[in-house]
Amino acid sequence: MEVADRVLEILEIMRETELWAAEYYKSCLLLCPESERDFFSKLSIEKNKHTQYISVIKAYCLKNPDYFELNVPFDAELAKKAISSIKDNIRRIQKWEIKYDQLANIAAEMEESIIRHRYGKIFKINHQNHLKLLNEISEDTIRHHKMVSEKTNKQ
């Protein structure tokens, strides 16, 4: 597999992870009290913003594949398992198999999984704006993890 194909594959997995994380937070609205709706809504909105950023980077990679290099290993199978886990948790929320007080713990585990992917370090990109987008996603994810972890400590 060529480097450009591998980069595009990784970017698609990253986009899917963020998309399903957004859906997870949106699903949390089914169980959370009115006072918590803003918390989960904002997280969902930010995750959707990340999917847009990754789509922009993918489009740039399609036009300029030589501007991308792989920097650190990325375990695609592990990332796909994380996506499956997120989808399973969404299904469990929809079937009322998860309680409200479990949502933040599950979210903290999900964000920790995303952090481990090291989005900002996977690639070397010869374009500062796109590197900034990946770094922003990484910084947001660390902040999300902190937010949901703090919520678990309050419950």
Image: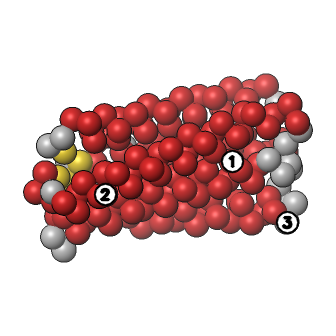
Labels 1 & 2 near each other (Cβ < 8 A) = no
Closer to the eye: label 3 or 2: 2
Is any atom of residue 46 visible in this view? yes
The residue drawn where x is 15% and y is 70% is 2
For disc 1, the neighbor class at 10 Å (few under 14, some 14 to 19, many from 20) is many
For numbered disc 3, what is the local secondary structure?
loop
Q: Give whichever of 35, 92 is nearer the camera.
A: 35
The residue drawn where x is 35% and y is 38% is 133
Which quadrant of the rendered structure holds the C terminus? top right
For disc 2, the neighbor class at 10 Å (few under 14, some 14 to 19, many from 20) is many
Instruction: Compute the Cα span from label 3 to label 2.
Output: 35 Å
Closer to the eye: label 1 or 3: 1
- Which mark is on residue 25? 1
- Which mark is on residue 58? 2
Give the quarter of the image for residue 87.
bottom right
For numbered disc 1, what is the local secondary structure?
helix
Q: Give whichever of 56, 14 is nearer the camera.
A: 56
Which quadrant of the rendered structure holds the N terminus? bottom left
Residue 115, percent across and down?
A: 46, 42
In the rendered view, does 77 fall on the left or right side of 60? Answer: right
Instruction: Compute the Cα span from label 1 to label 2.
Output: 24 Å
- Residue tagged by mark 3? 95
The residue drawn where x is 35% and y is 58% is 11
Q: How is the image coloured?
A: secondary structure
In the rendered view, does 33 fall on the left or right side of 19? Answer: right
